[in-house]
Amino acid sequence: MEHGKQIYEGKAKILYETSNPDELLVYYKDDATAGNGAKKGTIVDKGIMNNKMTAFFFDLLAKNGIKHHYISMPSDREMIVQKLQIVPLEVIVRNVAAGSLAKRLGLEEGVPMKRTVLEFCYKNDELGDPMLNRYHILAMDIATESELDEIARISFEVNDILTKFLKDRGVDLIDFKLEFGRNSKGEIILADEISPDNCRFWDSKTKEKLDKDRFRRDLGGVEDAYKEMLHRLTGE
Ligand code: ADP
Ligand code: UDP
């Protein structure tokens, strides 16, 4: 699609202006990184698959009353989104111990948490996305108390909707990362992407990993895992 000036290139996506000042075009790349950019590679057609899966999840969430930034999909790799002022937080929701949580707390990967865990990290690559608590966020003026409550409320709701939906498709939702932004009215809106790049998806029966851990941990079968997730979601 014709697009305007590039305003940002990140590790996985490029943002462009559009003719509408309230909207952006997001281009999904095949580039893959792990460990805050320490490991780099490409996953064939990842951009296409993540664009489609994100659009699918946002549509599902909208049907369940969640406000999000996704507007339309002009091509396989591109989506039009509402331009937001991003809250610089990575909001992590965890149902089962895995990854950095398992490592940090000495938990075995795959052990369910007794209740859902919500974590915040400061979205800052130079600092390596350090973990923050509510006090840090308020003290640093990253978000207000009511914004944080809204972010937590939406995150738990997204978790419930996605967990139930994925269970029917034979997938356990282990953990995931969300981002939020403010629209011109100051409302908190779900942003960024929902895909195997930022969620852990395990096959319910075999516990096979169907997400970016296959890339992070050199497990092989990376493209096939993304394809399998797209298939389970859309039938494609
Ligand atoms: P990173 O910045 O971590 O390398 P990406 O390559 O995915 O990540 O870049 C996408 C960028 O777009 C992220 O910085 C994200 O916060 C930002 N973003 C996501 N949704 C919106 C939106 N609706 N409006 C403005 N920026 C957004
Ligand atoms: N995550 C993410 N971006 C990050 C860090 C984590 O999308 O910068 C996601 C990751 O895909 C996983 C969840 O957040 O679904 C929890 O990740 P964890 O903290 O275990 O990080 P990792 O093991 O990747 O270091």
Image (cartoon, rainbow, N blue to C red):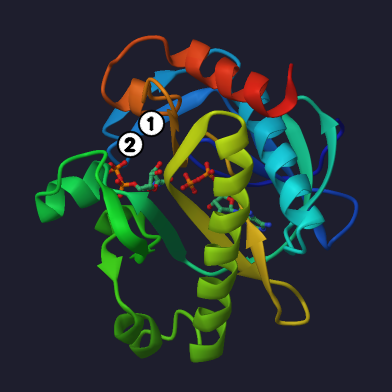
Percent coordinates x, y for residue 227 in the rendering:
59, 16
User: What is the spatial separation of the Cα atoms under label 2 and label 1, in whole angstroms?
Assistant: 5 Å
Disc 2: which residue: 37
| Left-right relation of 189 to 99 | right
Percent coordinates x, y for residue 159 in the rendering:
54, 56
Disc 1: which residue: 33
Query: Callout 2: helix, strand or loop?
Result: loop
Q: Residue at x 59, y 28 (%)?
A: 29
Look at the image and tell me whether residue 197 can be seen: no
Percent coordinates x, y for residue 59 in the rendering:
78, 46
Q: Residue at x 73, y 72 (%)?
A: 183
Bin the neighbour count of mark 2 within 10 Å (Cα to Cα): few under 14, some 14-19, many 20 and up. few
Q: Nearer the viewer, residue 230 or 178?
A: 230
Mark 1 CB near ligand 1 (8 Å cut) = yes
Q: Residue at x 19, y 47 (%)?
A: 102
Classify 53 as above or below 17.
above
Q: Residue at x 57, y 17 (%)?
A: 228
Bin the neighbour count of mark 1 within 10 Å (Cα to Cα): few under 14, some 14-19, many 20 and up. some
